[in-house]
Image: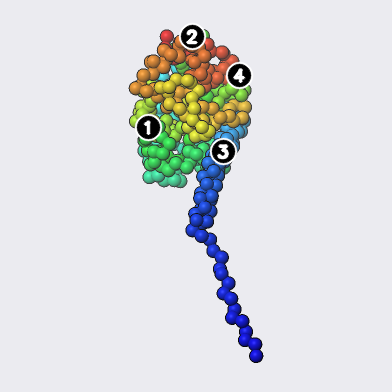
Amino acid sequence: MNAKPYPRRQRRSAFTLIELLVVVAIIALLISILLPSLSRARAQARTTLCGTRIGQLTKAMLMYADDYDEAPPFLALGHEDMDDLAGHHHGDMYPENRDEEYWWSHEDWLIRDIYLYCYETDWTTLDPEVVTPRTGTLYTYTNYEDVYRCPTFQRGPVGAASGGFYGEPKTQNVFNYTRTVLGRKLLSTILGDDEADDELSPGPIVKISAAYSPAAMMMTLDEQWDFHCAGNYDHGGSVGLSGYPMAAESVHGIVGDMLGDYHGIKGRELDYPDVPESKQGNAGYYDGHVALSRDPWAWRYCVDDNWPALVAWVVQDPQRGTKVFNLLVAGIFGQRGVDVNMDMLLELLGII
């Protein structure tokens, strides 16, 4: 009788600790390589989505204008002293000597009675059925609340200072697409306008057909949230714009609009080290197209608030001047077809 052989125990294969550590290290290396690419891809997707949204809003305004004698939605007067409007040309339908609340009360394209909430520091305490674009006259043409805000702006929660230059809390997350003061015709004694009584006077709203170059004229801005859009206005930059409240459009003077610090990489349009770097923001134009631009003077800030030194540096070279005020220069050309040179620009701004 033959005895059965004793079964030989098979040795189980296993990873050694060193092999496991090598695998973990490889995975970590791959993640470190892929994450920046994924982050850039997500950021690019938000940039594209922002361009789509602001483009839809711009086209909605153009459709609105088709129904209202080519006039885009109402735009408040872009003037710093809103209590002294005597002599300014508003058009026959608008009475003079009205305070800012009067003009804001007409800006109902975004939110009905938005002027009531311009000084609020936390919109989350307000009725969400009241402070919503659904109450605005433009909503008939948009039908989508997200069309009024950049997705990067939307990501920052109310009350947080994330992404803000001055570290102030964010007041609202409802909108950041605004309109530029150049939606009203810029009248000036420098340009020979009989209706103007000083260097900068707000004129009538620019109708679609009245724009000299619609492709050069901004209609909507992807505005920076902590500069007169959703900030608390304790800071107004080196040029002293503190305390100006928020409205549906920027009614804080020519330097009151700031393109957003949302898209792309940080940089400077102006090679001046005392001016902060910023990212870019989208803008919609009178012809309906959308383009990214970088604000040439981010947050209107200079180190030590020494903006006179910036002005003196700019005056030395006309090329620098056109870079600082390129949005203003392009807007005037888009409105009227006037090429503003450096001397005219300095006169317009009261610098000389």
Taking the view exactly as shown, the residue that stands out farthest to the bottom is: 1
Kind of residue indicated by mark 1: Tyr
**C-alpha span from label 2 to label 1:** 33 Å
Q: Nearer the viewer, mark 2 or mark 1?
A: 1
Q: Which element type, helix, strand or loop, lies under badge 2?
A: helix
Q: Secondary structure at mark 4?
A: loop
The quadrant in which the C terminus is found is top left
Report which residue position mark 1 lands on: 166
Counting residues from the start of the chain, the first of labels 4 and 2 encountered is 4
Per the image, the residue denoted by label 2 is 343
Inspect this view and state whether residue 276 appears.
yes
> Which is closer to the viewer, label 1 or label 4?
1
Judging depth in this view, the residue of 216 and 136 nearest the camera is: 216
Residue at disc 1, secondary structure = loop
Look at mark 4 in the image and give the residue it sits on: 212
The residue type indicated by label 2 comes to Asp
What residue is disc 3 on? 44
> For the residue marked with disc 3, what is the amino acid?
Gln
Q: Give x and y (percent) for residue 18.
A: 50, 56
Disc 1 crowd, CA 10 A, few/some/many (<14, 14-19, 20+): some
Q: Nearer the viewer, residue 240 or 134?
A: 240
| Residue under the image location 58 percent in, 20 percent down | 334
Q: CA distance from mark 2 to mark 3?
A: 40 Å
Foreground: disc 1 or disc 3: 3
Along the polypeptide, which appears first: circle 1 or circle 4?
1
Circle 2/circle 1 CB separation < 8 Å? no
